[in-house]
Each structure stands twice: as C-alpha cells, then as structure tokens.
Image (tube, coloured by chain):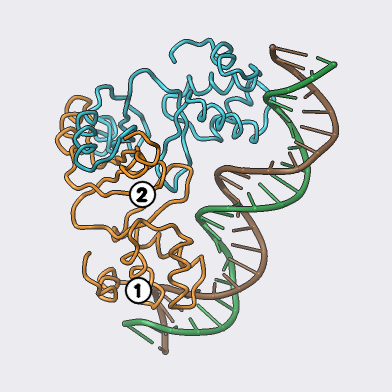
Chain colours: A orange, B cyan, C green, D brown
Amino acid sequence: MNNCNWEQAIRRLGKKATPQRKAILAALAEQDRPATVDEIFIKVREQQKTSLSTIYRNLDLLLSQGLINKQGFPGEKARYSLKKDDHEHTLVCMDCQKIVTITGCPLEAYAAEIASRENFVVLDHRMEMYGYCHKCMQAKGRV
Amino acid sequence: MNNCNWEQAIRRLGKKATPQRKAILAALAEQDRPATVDEIFIKVREQQKTSLSTIYRNLDLLLSQGLINKQGFPGEKARYSLKKDDHEHTLVCMDCQKIVTITGCPLEAYAAEIASRENFVVLDHRMEMYGYCHKCMQAKGRV
DNA sequence: TTTCTTGCAAAAAATTTGCAATTAA
DNA sequence: TTAATTGCAAATTTTTTGCAAGAAA
C-alpha cells in the first residue's frame, strides 16, 4: 500500500469511500511512526468534520480488512500504521518510543519446526523487540 | 524466580510482605499463561480480601522492581507473568485456547543481528504463535 | 509506634454502542 | 432511493488517585 489512491483501496473492500475514511488513510500515510487514535483524530479533524467513534470504527474496519497494523506497548495506547506489502516486525525504543520496522521475518522456518515438534498447526505469529535506539543510548551516556 | 518464598522476595525489595502481595505472586506462579489484571484479582480474592487498586498498585511495584513482566499485545489487556530464569514463548490454540510453552528461543541470535544492523540495543522481545492444536484439528476433521 | 499499604469511592482515560440524521452509490 | 456511515451522547471498560482506616515491622 504505497500509492495514495485511498478511494480505490476502500472501494476494493466493498465499502463506501467517505471523506473520513480517506482522511484516516492519508493521515496514516503521513505519519513517520505508527499513530495513536487521538493523533489520528486530530489529523483527520484538520481536514474533515469527524468524531472519535468514527475513528475507532474505521480503524477496526481497516484492521479487520488487513489494510493497517495495530501495534505498540502493552498497557499503552495502541498505535496504527499502514500495512506494507511484506510481513514486518517492529523494534521499539523503550525510551523515546521510536519504532523501527524490520522486514525479513526469522520465524517462518521456526514456525514450521515448532508445528511438527508440537503437533500444532501454526497459522500466525506476533513478535516485537524492545530496547533502546542509538540516540537514546547516547543520551544515557552508555555509548 | 522459581521458589515459592514470596515473603522473602518482597522483603528483599524493602517492602512489606502483605498477604495481598504474597497472593499476587502466588497467583502469577499458578497461571499457565501470563494473566490479566482481572484474572489476578479473582485469584487473589479467593485467598484474601483485596481490591482492584491494590492489584494495580502492586503489579506496578513488582514490575518496576523487575520481579514480573508486563506483556500482551497492544489494544488487548496487559498480561503479567513472573520473570523466569529462562525465557519462554507460547503457542496458543485459537480454538480451545490451550497454551503450549516452548523453550528454546529462536530469537536470541536474530536479536543480536538486528541490534547491529539497526544500531539498536535489543533488551527484550515478545513473541507468540497462533494456530490449532492437534485435537482441535481432528475435531475439525482436517487431520 | 511509625510508616507503609489497603479498601473504598470517586475520577480519569480509553473504547464501545444506540440511534437518528446524513451521505455515498 | 436505500443501505451504509456518521456524529452525538451516553454507556462500558480499564486504570488511576485521594484519603482515612488498618496492618506490618
């Protein structure tokens, strides 16, 4: 999803291309990091009249349709981002909350191994890594 | 943290070993998967008079002292578990909710690789696999 | 005793829902 | 025209906080 034809993307789901929906996708595309619901709300509201419930409902929709990802720290606000073509994982800085996206999943092969070892059909997995980014390490004087 | 001397563990933090605190650690020790706040609340309440705020406050305390982990995926309820000596992952049956614990983490080496590639200090990670256990596959007639 | 911790009740924060009005198709 | 979608307000759900009473050291 790297184009900007949000209208088409929404229509492909068999849904109505409302200004709010287009604005949500556009807002996600502009963010340099996965955005929280309120960040998205603020951004969308700059363009369109909208309400928080519309944001929530549409994020759920887009998520269930696989157009976006939901990520973030447990217990903290969820963050949303546009889904890229390939399977990704994230690297989250525990200090500045910066999120780095990583492509190249190391778990495909492992999942197959586990599947046969445990007699389990593995369909999906979720993985995130946590630590400190270079800048924050420097700030901590640990570099 | 494999012993059951919760009293000692709490004292070591310089905190009072209240029945509620001991019960929280005991509850976490009994769980076969990281537990949500309300699961812990229910379990503790079976033993001790308690309140939700006590659970929240003590989970925060134990977390900040490094005795427990906070995990769970964004948007879902946070889940807490005792910190183990060795690192584990889980395999969750999407049908019967059975949890299989897997030792032998495939991510240690990968984390090191990512750390140098992305210039990030990787301290922790979270990973869960989802699918169907053998029994549920049989029940579905897919085996 | 003294200080920390608890329970309660109320407040905040985050998310969801019902429903009438509106709008995309 | 009509079925999907929105905004609003109210309801839930989750988490946090103030404070007086109670308990551990």
Residue A64 appearing in the image? no
The answer to whether C2 is drawn above or below residue A63 in the figure is above
Q: Horizontal and vertical percent for residue A47?
A: 43, 78
Residue position for label 1: A22
Q: Horizontal and vertical percent for residue B38?
A: 56, 35
* Mark 1 Cα-neighbour bin, 10 Å: few <14, some 14–19, many ≥20: many
Q: Is residue C16 left or right of residue A27?
A: right
Q: Horizontal and vertical percent for residue D17?
A: 68, 43
Residue position for label 2: A98
The answer to whether B112 is drawn above or below residue C14 in the figure is above
- Specify the quadrant that holds the C terminus of chain B: top left
At x 20%, y 29%, the residue is B109
Mark sitting earlier along the chain (2/1): 1
CA distance separating discs 2 and 1: 26 Å
Residue A81 found in image quarter: bottom left
Residue B8 found in image quarter: top right
Instruction: Using the image, name the chain to which the residue with label 2 belongs.
Output: A
Residue type at the position of mark 1: Lys
Instruction: Please tell me whether mark 2 sits on a helix, a strand or a loop.
Output: loop
The answer to whether B20 is drawn above or below residue B73 in the figure is above
Instruction: Using the image, name the chain to which the residue with label 1 belongs.
Output: A
At x 47%, y 26%, the residue is B68
Q: Is residue C9 left or right of residue B99?
A: right
Q: Is residue B97 left or right of residue A125?
A: right
In this rendered view, identify the residue nearer to me: A110 or B139: A110
Nearest to viewer (mark 2 / mark 1): 2
* Mark 2 Cα-neighbour bin, 10 Å: few <14, some 14–19, many ≥20: some
In this rendered view, identify the residue nearer to me: B34 or B87: B87
Instruction: Please tell me whether mark 1 sits on a helix, a strand or a loop.
Output: helix
Q: Horizontal and vertical percent for residue B108?
A: 24, 28
